[in-house]
Amino acid sequence: MIKSYKDLEVHKLAFDLAMDIFWETRKFPKEEVYSLTSQLVRSSRSVSANISEGWAKRSYDSVFKQHLIHSLGSNSETEDWLNYAHSCGYLSTEKYKELTERNDRVGKMLTKLHQNWRNYEK
């Protein structure tokens, strides 16, 4: 049984991905701190943050699902920023592929959760 947002596998994966992106961006050039680095870190963190915020409001199915939609938006934004980071040469092809595959997995899990969510606590 899911008792907390921390029990959701998609939250765990999104959080871990955001942390790995954070550490990877520490290697980006300093001139990117207030642009690409900041945007990539913020969008990746927003995925798990929206899941946890939505979980607190889960007694209202539509509100929780709206937060999942926000998570999906941030997930898509993260993908775009990863594309920029790779195109700028800040991520190796191998690292880019790994991060985008993980990001894609999180997106698919969010989509399934959104499609199948039913609050059984009512």
Image (cartoon, rainbow, N blue to C red):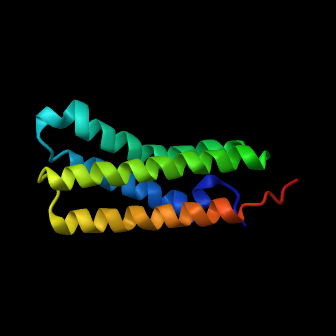
Residue 93: image quadrant is bottom left
**3 sits to left or right of 24:** right
Residue at position x 49%, y 48% in the image = 73
Question: Percent position (x, y) of residue 121?
Answer: 84, 56
The mark tally for this picture is 0
Q: Where residue 74 appears, x then y in whole percent?
A: 45, 47
Residue 65, position as x, y percentages in the image: 67, 50
Please report the residue visible at 23 percent of the width from the left and 49 percent of the height from the top: 84
In the shown orientation, is residue 19 left or right of residue 8?
A: left
Q: Work out whether residue 25 can be spotted.
A: yes
Above or below: residue 83 compared with residue 106: above
Can residue 58 be spotted in the picture? Answer: no
- Image quarter (top left, top right, bottom left or bottom right) of the N terminus: bottom right
Residue 13 x, y percent position in the rendering:
46, 62
Toward the right, the furthest residue is 122
Return the residue found at the far top: 34
